[in-house]
Image (cartoon, grey):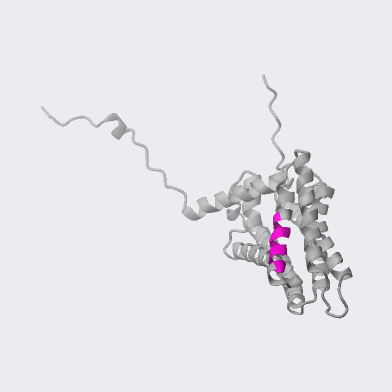
């Protein structure tokens, strides 16, 4: 009589081990989820059925968002320019910085009082404060623009690298929003479109640096501030529209799921 014991049930029915997803894909999925969530909060959801104009306007934050983005910088450059002393060629730095940061603080306070989301306003206040600190500590008005240069360099590099390594940031965000994760990478058409969209965004940030840095080194504060405004929302909005239309073209039959009525 055999004394060999029967295999344990869990040994007989043991399922094959699942292969964990590559770390690269997992990290990219996490980045895509973060980018997609941010895009959705900004009203840029390709599955939302919104018009291009509505999406672009939502991405800019409406009239309030436009004012919060533009006015602090506009006030700084206007006040600095009109207070320039012909003898020294310098404007009133402290007055310009004070009014610029002050208007950003007012926007933030107004949102707090109205119990509205303060992310955009706080972001504008922090940006104005950091820029003002650079200028105040050095006594050079042109240094007010250094944080903007750093931001453009970081964003431009991120978009460029993501495109070159085949993990376009636009693709990661769109993949999350459209519910396909990183599956778009197996579609040559989507990869190509997302590659060029990332390159377009990288080019926008690079163009800002190429145009504005020479003015910074020339210490031409008025021209630098003016071009910063011109190359801000006026270039951002059309690129948002192009990105939106391109993504919608890649997913023409996708629509938001209908809500199931409660039983």
Residue 112 location (% of width, % of height):
75, 42
For residue 238, say whether it is visible.
Answer: no
At 58% from the left edge and 54% from the top edge, which residue is drawn? 186
Residue 235 location (% of width, % of height):
80, 62
Q: Residue 147 appears in which quarter of the rendering? A: bottom right
Q: Residue 224 appears in which quarter of the rendering? A: bottom right
Picture quarter with the C terminus: top right
For residue 1, say whether it is visible.
Answer: yes
Residue 142 location (% of width, % of height):
75, 72
Would you place residue 2 above or below residue 31 in this image? Answer: above
6 falls in the magenta region: no
- Near-viewer residue (234 or 225): 225
Q: How many marks?
A: 0
At 24% from the left edge and 32% from the top edge, which residue is drawn? 7
129 falls in the magenta region: yes
At 15% from the left edge and 31% from the top edge, which residue is drawn? 4
Left or right: 104 with respect to 83? left
Residue range (magenta): 126-136
């Amino acid at each position: 009589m055999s004394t060999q014991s029967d295999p344990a049930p869990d040994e007989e029915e043991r399922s094959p081990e699942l292969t964990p997803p590559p770390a690269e894909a997992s990290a990219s999925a996490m980045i895509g989820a973060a980018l997609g969530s941010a895009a959705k909060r900004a009203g840029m959801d390709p599955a939302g059925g919104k018009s291009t104009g509505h999406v672009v306007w939502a991405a800019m934050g409406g009239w309030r968002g436009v004012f919060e983005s533009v006015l602090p910088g506009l006030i700084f450059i206007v006040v600095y320019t009109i207070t320039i002393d012909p003898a020294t060629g310098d404007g009133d730095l402290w007055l310009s910085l004070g009014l610029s940061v002050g208007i950003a603080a007012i926007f933030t306070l107004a949102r707090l009082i109205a119990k509205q989301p303060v992310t955009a306003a706080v972001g504008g206040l922090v940006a104005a404060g950091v820029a003002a600190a650079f200028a105040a500590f050095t006594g050079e008005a042109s240094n007010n623009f250094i944080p903007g240069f750093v931001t453009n360099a970081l964003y431009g590099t991120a978009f460029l690298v993501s495109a070159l390594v085949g993990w376009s940031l636009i693709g990661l965000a769109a993949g999350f929003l459209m519910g396909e994760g990183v599956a778009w990478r197996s579609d040559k058409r989507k990869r190509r479109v997302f590659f060029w969209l990332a390159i377009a965004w990288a080019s926008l940030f690079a163009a800002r640096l190429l145009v504005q840095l020479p003015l910074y080194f020339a210490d031409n504060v008025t021209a630098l501030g003016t071009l910063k405004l011109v190359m801000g929302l006026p270039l951002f909005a059309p690129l948002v529209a192009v990105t939106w239309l391109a993504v919608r073209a890649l997913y023409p039959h996708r629509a938001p799921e209908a809500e199931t009525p409660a039983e």
